Amino acid sequence: MDWTHPDWESHACRMAEETVRPESRWYQPLANTPRHLFVPRWWTPTEHDGTRVYEVSDGPADPEGWMRAAYDGSRSLITRVGPHHADHAKPDARVSETWPTSSSTLPSLVVLMYRHAVMADTSRVLVTCGSGYGTALACQRLGDARVTSVDVDPYLVQAAAERLEAAGHRPTLEVCDVTGDLPGTFDRIISTVSVKTVPASWLKALAPGGRLVTTLSGTGLLITADKTDDGGAIGQVAPESAGFMRTRHGDDYDPAPDDTALWERAQHADGEHISTGLYPVMRVSDTWDVKSTLELTAPGIDHRMHVGQDGTRTAYMLHPDGSWARATATGPRELPVVHQGGPRRLWDELDRIRTWLVIDGDLPVNGAAVRITPDGTLTLARSGWTATL
């Protein structure tokens, strides 16, 4: 592939200037790494006939659009949806909405994760691969010999290896489920995929005094933790929020359970409990702190939202245990009528968390202390509140 676009360096330098200060150790890696090389094609979410879909974007077919997309430091580029690689898609391909399974993470977030890792010049690091762009940044910063990059997808590892070599890098690359055994011992483990809890294998692979940086699935929580003498780790929730695709263990995520009957009840049933909500309807999926707290107290809720042409707002909550809630309000500032059914009152739990936020001004997930035992049990704690994963 011809990646020698005549103007890519100026785009990369502009992105570096917008992302970090010139004296940052990450300025030169950002300015000297050809991100467009790692994302020649990507999936763009859009609508077709009223339905959410992904359409393939081809960089070489639109060089200027390629440069704008690749060197937008605040933009992730989705390179795989479900089992569909953008590299393999036909021109003008379109895929029905499904879960993205790989991307080139927005550069500003990659650098944020690396900064939280506090890498020394001699650090041996393990990073997650994806497109290979984040791996290239680590190679620019530390040298190829100190960087190991893993991904569960053999094609992604192969493609990343070829593109890294074209950019002048040859780190160690492995096809590996990052939640399983890791290929070595590392001073830093930085995961740009989210995990339900920290795998015990990470603690085994982390050198004494080493640090791990990751996010927790279903939340916006970015955590850092340093290895302790007992083989566990302690740290805290970072002040910044972040979200990544969750780990998968094969070609695609496991199929979601069939919730057709539960969705039908949530839309139409009266339920066992009808009340007036304490607060206007909110789009929970767009909030970091409320969503994170709710995920820790009642993990696995599916949130859906519908806004009618007349301004009516209806939020739905569905849980695999059969609990559901439907809250409908006539406008964005009106209190909703809430219907709930199943073993738990999901909307009541949401209102409880929002009351906590109103009274205290924040939620205890913000800045919580993190403790991880050697077996991977993770506990968050702050101001008398705890959650264990």
Image (cartoon, helix red, strand yellow):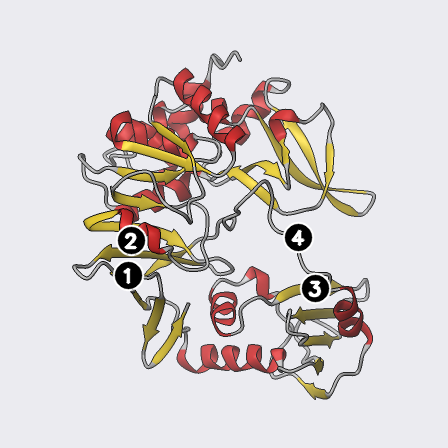
Q: CA distance from mark 1 to mark 2?
A: 7 Å
Q: Give above or below for 316 relative to 351.
A: above
Q: CA distance from mark 2 to mark 3?
A: 39 Å
What amino acid is at disc 1?
A: Pro
Q: How crowded is the residue under tag 1: few (<14 C-alpha within 10 Å), some, or many (20+)?
A: many
Q: Give above or below for 101 relative to 264.
A: above
- Residue 52 rendering spot, x and y as whole percentages: 73, 46
Q: Nearer the viewer, mark 2 or mark 3?
A: 2
What amino acid is at disc 3?
A: Met
What amino acid is at disc 4?
A: Pro
Q: CA distance from mark 4 to mark 1?
A: 31 Å
Q: Residue at x 27, y 44 (%)?
A: 188
Query: Which badge, 4 or 2, comes first in the chain's sequence?
Result: 2
Quarter of the figure that contains the C terminus: bottom left
Instruction: Look at mark 4 in the image and give the residue it sits on.
Output: 255
Q: Are marks 4 and 1 in contact (CB under 8 Å)?
A: no
Instruction: Look at mark 2 in the image and give the residue it sits on.
Output: 203
Residue 17 seen in the current view: no
Q: Are marks 3 and 4 in contact (CB under 8 Å)?
A: no
Query: Which badge, 4 or 1, comes first in the chain's sequence?
Result: 4
Q: Residue at x 74, y 34 (%)?
A: 94
Place residue 285 in its image quadrant.
Answer: bottom right
Q: Residue at x 25, y 41 (%)?
A: 185
The disc placed on residue 305 is: 3
Instruction: Look at mark 1 in the image and give the residue it sits on.
Output: 374
Q: Nearer the viewer, mark 3 or mark 4?
A: 4
Q: Are marks 1 and 2 in contact (CB under 8 Å)?
A: yes
Q: Nearer the viewer, residue 255 or 55?
A: 255
Query: Which badge, 1 or 2, comes first in the chain's sequence?
Result: 2
Q: Nearer the viewer, mark 1 or mark 3?
A: 1
Query: Which badge, 3 or 4, comes first in the chain's sequence?
Result: 4
Q: Nearer the viewer, residue 159 or 335?
A: 159
